[in-house]
Amino acid sequence: MSNVAGKAYGMNVMTPLRWWTAIWQKVIFWVVVKTFPYFLKGLLTLSLIHYARWTIINRWSFPRLDKSQPKEKLTYSYMLFESNFNGSWDQYIDSFSFAIPSGLDMFWRWNIKYPKSIPLHDFYHYIRFNQVECDHYYNAYPLASANDVKSAQALYADLAAFADSSEALSDDAFAAAWQQFLADNQHSLGSMGTSPLMSTSNQLVQEHHHDDLQLAARQTQQEEA
Amino acid sequence: MANKFGNSYGLTTLCPLINGHQQHTSFDKITRHRIQLLEENSGSPFARIPDTYFARLFILNDVFFEQGNNVARDHLQSKYLVFTSNFHGDLEPYLQGMWNNAEADVRHIWQYAVAFDKVQNAADFIRYIKRCQLTTTLFFNGSTDDSLQQQLKSLYVKQAFTEFALQHQGKPVAELRAAFKTFMQQLQIDNIETPSWQPGQTQL
């Protein structure tokens, strides 16, 4: 029951937009996909996102699975934004706002009451107000950042190739190749310990989880009594 | 308008909950409490579901936004269990793996969802989730789309090799070479199953 799982933060933001602008928004996203990577270059440059997605839910598209379920009667369509990123909430919003303000405005421009990404204070308020907290958030590699995952992939391939290619070398040639290999892959090296944010957050999660488990145990005892 | 980006899949679902209660507690509150009590990290049910990169669960009680005199007031008629996942591969095998590896958790979490009482097996579960699924409008992958096992093995290799390189700085070449050979044998770089990191692992 936390938005933090290791080095990742899980954000959910649900914002309304008029049904006809929702259609235009879909066209914009379609253009972004077709012209990728130009428009998403800023996101790649930020390099702190594992995965992110925007889902436009038309006002008539909320799942209705049974006649017993009341029909939704909504004025607006909605956009659900979800992100898995490294760092704190503030760092993420700051990075987005400073690095790709025009990109943000393009993605949210038709959302009701969207204040634009600059000035920052109004943008902070908008995201905070429309954010929905995670009740359970899972990350398969809490110790790793998105850059760790990418650099690990590169190092894995290079190390396998180096092990094969260096086997038949003389000692002198091996020493030179080793130095070259380390120099070429220095950006992929680094230990992945826990981060201060991760430790603090994890401690809070454990405390809350402990409290919840105790509460659940007391409720069970009361029900049994 | 795609749920896939390379080999990675972005699943978004809104699962309506039954409007009702049990012993003065509404079904959405019971469901939220159950979700909040799930174990974290390697103890999470998602750690048992193959190829899950990230997953989350939350309850959407209503649509909350800054209303005012110049905008309409919207309220949802149902509360929704929102389940989203980022994983490697295709949807049906993933949901099959979810059912096979975490059936008890799935039944516990979705117990009060509309029409979930008709879900009896993996095929039903796949059909049910597809009915709740929303198509992703824009999916961005800032990581890799390798299988989770490959990602975890690569992270294990990165950590182990970094430590090896640090420990062997300035060593004579013969010693370095012998140690590297032993290291690579222990690393078993072509065996992606072991040694490796475990899903949700929080300690080195």
Image (tube, rainbow, N blue to C red):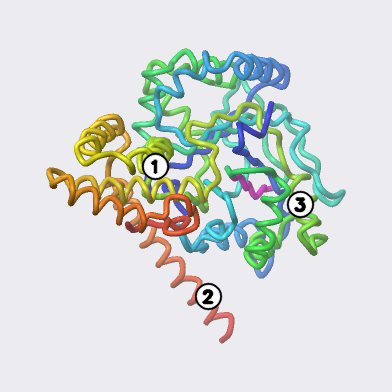
- Identified at 47% across, 16% down, the residue is A116
Rendering quarter of residue A92 = top left
**Residue A213: percent from left, percent from top:** 46, 70
Left-right relation of B61 to B191: right
Residue type at mark 3 is Ile
Residue type at mark 2 is Gln
Disc ID at residue B126:
3
Q: Give the SS element for disc 2.
A: helix
Badge nearest the viewer, 3 or 1: 1
Local crowd size for mark 3, using a 10 Å CA cut-off: few (<14), some (14–19), many (≥20): some
Q: Give the SS element for disc 3.
A: helix
Q: Which residues are magenta?
A: B79-85
**Residue B177: percent from left, percent from top:** 24, 48
Local crowd size for mark 2, using a 10 Å CA cut-off: few (<14), some (14–19), many (≥20): few
Depicted B13 relative to depicted A113: above or below: below
Cα distance between the residues tagged 3 and 1: 44 Å
**Residue B113: percent from left, percent from top:** 72, 56
Extreme residue toward the right, this view? A67
Rendering quarter of residue A26 = top right
The residue tagged 1 is A164
State yes or no: discs 2 and 1 in contact (Cβ < 8 Å): no
The residue tagged 2 is A219
